[in-house]
Image: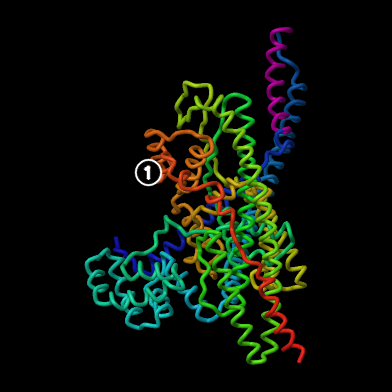
Amino acid sequence: MSNQVFTHKDKISDLNDEVKRTGDHFTKKVTKAMKKESWKLNFFELVWMAVVSVCIGLYVAYNIGFGKSPDNNLFLYFGIYTAFTVVMTALMRMFKTTAEKEAEQKTQRSLLRCNNHIFHLITKSRNCFMDDMDETQRRIYAATIILQNPESSSSELEVAVQDLTDSTALAQAVCRIESFRHHGMMARIADEYNNIADLVEQHFNQLYEVYPTAAQIFMDRMKGYAPNMQDGLSRNPGFLERTLNAIEHNDLNIVTFEDVSAVFSFTFEMLNGREIPVLHPEFKGHEDYMVAQDKLDRSRSYLKQSIAKRNSRLKALAELLSSELETEIVIPAMFSSDELVEVIENLYKEYRKAINNAIKDKNKKELRRLKKVLTSSFKFQEKVNRHQRRAERYLAAFKSIQKSYNKQWRKHGKSIELILGDEKGSSKDSISIREDYITLDDMEKVTLANKLITLHRHTLKEQKIKHKKFIQIELSPNAYKRLAMEYVLILDEMLHFSQPEEMFAIEFSNMPCLSHIDINSPSRTKVGLAILSIEELQQTRKKVAHRLAYNLREYYKVALNQSTIDYFVRQYGAEREYLMNVNQSKLSEKQTVEERYNINIKMKDWEKRFTPTFKRMRLVLSK
């Protein structure tokens, strides 16, 4: 027997084959959802089985009734009839098997093609997002994506660090650090880091002022800490809400290219088996209390939706202003409305400086461009103000309903009991926790793929493109936004994520890292890698558990005892310290409802403030 030596290339080839098999197995499993039993086939099977039963019954009945066997002619008749039905059944089964196989192969091809289309859309929409940046921003953004990828090679990390820092010494150092990390040699990493610590700190501080996310991942990589595939990446907060509002108002400016890419990524996840956990409280008790609780829930949902819409408008306004001006002002990834208002006001001040410079230089082209941007921004600000007024109305309604709820709680809610897991409560008034998952079953995945393929065909027709595959075309920026909006409409029909709790669960769930998937990989490989990434992703329920615990304590006045806290920590991965703070009402003591939701924002009337500046602009433009 010969000894076979496997090279590194052989191992990589075997791994690629395994990934393809994973993708192939998944798509075949999903396509089986299309298989249906034929009533015609079942009918013929029943017929010939009935004939056999009749023959046996006839023989027994003749012998009992007449004391003799029936005539051979009768058996001949039934025999021919049985043979005919058996042949018909066999032929129908053969045709059915052939048709089913063809249908399964067609459905499998549609699934793979749809996955391939969406993955290309993720990449192309991300390129549109990068096109809006200047070269420095693009360089840092691309480097951040490479550093966030757990599967990035040493050479890729070298390129990323070189782009981030413009330091050859640090670029070479990260290669050495990554080599040691692969072998778990943390002591050698410490040696390397000690030699470059001052230089790393210097570049970290410079980056952190402008690009905090890039700075943090850079520091982690230089210390030998690679991102974990289980942790995934944070989503862009509010991407679904902004897209739904863009649909509602038919306003493409509301949705950003970052939102577009997030929509395509989310669709890609759902098509490949993603499950996102949601926790719902279920109430059982006195009818008056149940009615009051239902009104409180709906009122709070309306309030949160109005605030989310206002915050989305704020972010869209900030991104509009920052995208059209060279500035070092950074929009925070995780933001409060007060922070966004401050960013917007600083951006308006930058615009005033830019206009003054353009007036000084008599640059009419630049003045027209700045005027156009500011005019659009004032319309956005009016939308912000409109949603602000709506939020204030919902706040007044919420406070009134909360008073009614508190009255019912004093009558009927004091005895309410929180039921955990399989426990049985001693009180007839109780709250239990129901855990759901936002996901698609196999039939829904097939339906989604077919709808998206049809949508892609219509897109090709609208663009008047012939003799080209969908993945080969380059759409206009607005076409990508329209496509993302259509995706959201199709998904909302299946997932109903316009509900506040579902939307919160999606937007604050972690998403798998997909940047390690090569865009030119075969479709089966893409699907296989996506499934492995999704399966590897830790299903964290910490944020939804924190939200539920807060609502239980703040709105339903349910105390979180030690066993409840232990259950939330053990079952949902919640933070014990946070739950203890919630239980002691430290959060509510410090904040009113207005403060908690940042309702009372104060934004200056910038259209009015720019009136004198616009007069000066008109004088220059009229000459």
Protein image colouring: rainbow
> Is residue 461 or residue 358 the one in the foreground?
358
**CA neighbours of label 1 inside 10 A, class few (<14), some (14 to 19), many (20+):** some
Mark yes or no: residue 358 visible.
yes
Instruction: Identify the residue at image location x=44%, y=41%.
Output: 585
Q: Residue at x 47, y 75 (%)?
A: 140
Q: Specify the amino acid type for callout 1.
A: Arg
Position of residue 367 measured from the top left corner of the image (x, y, whole percent)? 68, 84
Instruction: Please tell me which residue is depicted at 24% across the width and 73% down the height of the picture.
Output: 194
The residue sitting at 31% across, 68% down in the picture is 223
Q: Measured along the vertical axis of the image, is residue 608 above or below residue 36?
A: below
- How far across and how far down the image is residue 418, in percent? 48, 30
From the viewer's perspective, tell me whether residue 573 is left or right of residue 56: left
How many labels were placed on the picture?
Answer: 1
**Rendering coords of residue 317 (x, y %):** 63, 67
Camera-nearest residue between 78 and 572: 572
> Is 60 covered by the magenta stretch?
yes
Q: Which residues are magenta?
A: 43-66
| Helix, strand or loop for disc 1 | helix
In the picture provided, is 265 more to the left or to the right than 564?
right
Place residue 261 in its image quadrant: bottom right
Residue nearest the observer in this picture, 251 or 91: 251
* 30 on left or right of 586: right
- Please name the residue that numbered disc 1 is placed on: 576
Q: Main secondary structure of the magenta part?
A: helix
Q: Is residue 495 visible?
A: no
Indicate yes or no whether the magenta region holds residue 147. Answer: no
**Image quarter in which the C terminus is found:** bottom right
Q: Residue 511: where, in percent of width, then height? A: 50, 57
The answer to which quarter of the image holds residue 616 is bottom right
Is 159 placed above or below 106 here? below
